[in-house]
Image: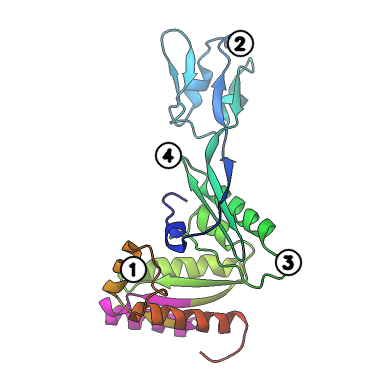
Amino acid sequence: MDAPNLHLVLQQAVQPKRTDYYGMGKGFIDIDQCSDCGFCAENCRFAAIKWDNTYYQVDYYACEGCGVCVEICPVQAVSLKPDIAGEITLYANATVFSTAQLKMGSGTSGKLVSAVKKEMQMAAPEDAELAIIDGSPGIGCPVIASLSGVDMVLIVTEPSLSGISDMERIIRTAAKFQLKMAVCINKYDTNLSNTQKIEAICEELNLPCVGRIPFDTEAVKAINKGQSIIDIDCAAGRSVKEVFNNAIQVLNNSGGI
């Protein structure tokens, strides 16, 4: 949501449908009704309300839309106004591709993920068999929004200490949703020792490890040409296809990886 680029690689041929996304509202002070008591400025935890020697006003970029100013104003001079926080883009033809982008500095990306998923569901044909969500890294609000309602999570990790730590955290998060999980290891050959640690963790937790993807300089060349790695013949692309097939087996409970 912050810097999406998948649409560049997929090169959609149809004209997209673009929709404004309204996130959290922004504080607005009616200066004709304001009594200049200063309660809103005193209680704003984001320091978004300032006195400019004439009246109080809200700093648009500092306001997080929490609504404390609205609740605390004794004369009801403050309100939250709808604010366009980003844009949802929908490509719909034989397949449906839904994406979005937040305006610089905007938040509420978790709500935007949910909106993108809703757009995809509404546009998908009734006989659609598979929807793939490219979740964001970490375990924050956007990731939780991505996990909501899915049948399976494919965790993509890398053989580094931070990669192992993040993998363990997302496993715990997905477990709370009682979701089916599988793991694949990207750039596995950059640290074979940590790759083995990841596979040992998967074995201990009884999670299928559906493949290893090697570090491949051809991947960078493909992206620079506006291609995905499965559009060219390269080691990483072949491994990704294997990961996909194994992940579908896990999803369908069709047995042995």
Q: Earlier in the sequence, mark 2 or mark 4?
A: 2
The question of residue 188 being in magenta is answered with: yes
Q: Secondary structure at mark 2?
A: loop
Residue 125, given in percent of the width and then of the height, sits at 70, 64
Distance from the alpha carbon under mark 3 to that under mark 4: 37 Å
Whether residue 206 is visible: no
Q: Earlier in the sequence, mark 3 or mark 2?
A: 2
The question of residue 40 being in magenta is answered with: no
Which residue lies under the disc numbered 2? Answer: 33
Distance from the alpha carbon under mark 2 to that under mark 4: 30 Å
Amino acid found under the numbered disc labelled 1: Ala
Q: Earlier in the sequence, mark 2 or mark 1?
A: 2
Which residue lies under the disc numbered 3? Answer: 126
Distance from the alpha carbon under mark 3 to that under mark 2: 52 Å
Q: Relative to residue 203, is residue 8 depicted above or below?
A: above
Residue 216, given in percent of the width and then of the height, sits at 29, 75
Which residue lies under the disc numbered 1? Answer: 222
Amino acid found under the numbered disc labelled 3: Glu
Q: Nearer the viewer, mark 3 or mark 4?
A: 3
Residue 120, given in percent of the width and then of the height, sits at 62, 58
Which residue lies under the disc numbered 4? Answer: 105
Amino acid found under the numbered disc labelled 2: Gln
Q: Nearer the viewer, mark 4 or mark 1?
A: 1
Q: Relative to residue 234, is residue 118 depicted above or below?
A: above
Front residue (pair 203, 4): 4
Q: Quadrant of residue 222?
A: bottom left
Residue 42, given in percent of the width and then of the height, sits at 47, 22
Q: Quadrant of residue 200?
A: bottom left
Distance from the alpha carbon under mark 2 to that under mark 1: 59 Å
Q: Write down the region rendered in magenta.
A: 183-209
Query: What's the residue at 60%, 67% (across, down)?
Result: 131
